[in-house]
Amino acid sequence: MSVTINVEVINSELPIRNLKVPDGTTYENVLDILGMNQETVLILKENFSKEKEAVPVDGIAVPGNLTIICIASQG
């Protein structure tokens, strides 16, 4: 089985995209797929009430909307 995640990256030129990843994939794995360093981003997941909450990089990815905010300079 797989998980579909709608990923939006803020402060980056990466486009919004849908990722399909295997069950058990961590958010760290998602960052690796996107070529992003976990030390330079903040990961937010939309909860059931549509509010965004920070998630740990070692958390298991679940279906839905994911926002990644780049917090370090890209240049």
Image (cartoon, rainbow, N blue to C red):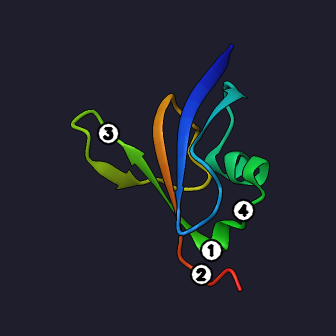
**Mark 2 surroundings within 10 Å by alpha-carbon count, few (fewer than 14), some (14 through 19), many (20 or more):** few
Q: Which mark is residue 48?
A: none
Above or below, 21 relative to 58: above
Please tell me the numbered disc located at residue 47: 3
- In the image, what residue type sits under mark 1? Thr
Name the residue carrying label 4.
Answer: 36
Residue 4 versus residue 65 in the image, above or below = above
User: Which residue in the structure is indicated by mark 2?
Assistant: 72
- Residue at the location (47% across, 53% down)? 55
Q: Residue at x 55, y 43 (%)?
A: 7
* Residues marked 1 and 2 touching at CB (< 8 Å): yes
Q: Secondary structure at mark 1?
A: helix
Residue with the mark numbered 1: 40
Q: Is mark 1 in CB contact (under 8 Å) with mark 4? A: yes
Mark 3 to mark 4 CA distance (whole Å): 23 Å
Q: Quadrant of the N terminus?
A: top right
Which quadrant holds residue 40?
bottom right
Contact check, label 4 and label 2, Cβ < 8 Å: no
Residue 60 position in % (x across, y down): 58, 38
Please tell me which residue is depicted at 60% across the width and 66% down the height of the picture: 12
Instruction: Find the distance from the CA under tag 1 to the CA under tag 4.
Output: 8 Å
Q: Earlier in the sequence, mark 4 or mark 2?
A: 4
